[in-house]
Image: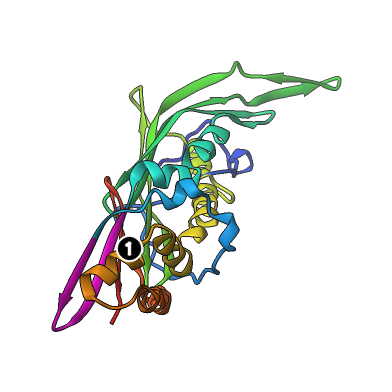
Amino acid sequence: MLFNSKYFNSSMKFSMLFMVLCLPSMMTISSSLVSVQAIPKNSLSIAQFQCIQDFDMNVGSRGWLFSATIPSQCLDSMLHTKEILAKNQGRQKDTEFNKVDISNLRGNFINGGYRIEGNWKVYHRELIAKTFGKKHYTPWSEDDGSFYQDILLGIDSGNLIVNPGKNNIRRNSQGLIRDAIGDFIIYGEGNFRDKFVDEIKNEIQKLNGQSIAQMLINKNAHQYISERTKISEKSAIALINNASGRINGQISNQGLRISLRLR
């Protein structure tokens, strides 16, 4: 829980960049479905096609269920998570009264989403007086600590789901966590959490149902389906394309497990 500090007044609270996810204990944000558009065929690289693996086919009385996996290392590459983390490190706020550094950012896929961890350091000073046009300040004070932020993501019926999840902010020394770092990371306008969610949304748009169907076909999933069901490869391609709007996906530390009901 974040507390107001006597060293900060409302005019000094800064709102900036970052990220996502608030636990029910801190903030509740309902899930939302965001429709996304298919990307052009030539925008998917051969390396991305090679990422889809572990084909499985269940043919039963309730229909044909096909599934496959996009491993976590491939998701990192496809969503450019390492690049996003790198550009959000360093001095992120630098004003007359406050400076904020974010460092040691790293991320991992977890069940249901992606967790970002990092360290923060905030510097603060106050104006004591202004005499003859010259400003006099208190010495810079410092606070530092760590945080994590979760991003909930997946695919449901060909639509992407991206939402904030839980978070935690810790201070290395004893005492109250200052408003400044809370606003910067979670609560302020344009904060780090929300900025990161938007950037992940922009990247995960490439993983909608139609683009996944295209990757499956380029990885010869239709041949696998043809062998398992004894239908023609042409018919298998048609089934995959027709099912693109029904593709579902669940994130874990292993990657994205996708499934589609072909008939």
Label 1: which secondary element? strand
Left or right of 45, for residue 148: left
Q: Quadrant of residue 246?
A: bottom left
Give the residue displayed 60% in from the left and 16% down from the top: 139
129 relative to 43, above or below: above
In the picture of the structure, the residue carrying the numbered disc 1 is 249
How dense is the environment of label 1, judged by Cα within 10 Å: few (below 14), some, or many (20 and up)? many
215 relative to 75, above or below: below
Q: Residue furthest top?
A: 139
Spot occupied by residue 140 in the image (x, y as percentages of width and height): 58, 18
In this orientation, which residue lies closer to the viewer: 250 or 192?
250
In this orientation, which residue lies closer to the viewer: 260 or 192?
260
226 relative to 189, above or below: below
Give the residue displayed 77% in from the left and 23% down from the top: 130
Give the residue displayed 46% in from the left and 42% down from the top: 77
Q: Quadrant of the N terminus?
A: top left
Spot occupied by residue 165 in the image (x, y as percentages of width and height): 36, 53
Residue 23, can we see it? yes
Of helix, strand and loop, which mostly describes the magenta segment?
Answer: strand
Mark 1: which amino acid? Gly
Left or right of 56, for residue 41: right
Spot occupied by residue 138 in the image (x, y as percentages of width and height): 62, 19
Q: Residue furthest right?
A: 132
Q: Which residues are magenta?
A: 56-69
Left or right of 221, for residue 230: left
Q: Quadrant of the C terminus?
A: bottom left
Give the residue displayed 32% in from the left and 63% down from the top: 249
Spot occupied by residue 201 in the image (x, y as percentages of width and height): 51, 56
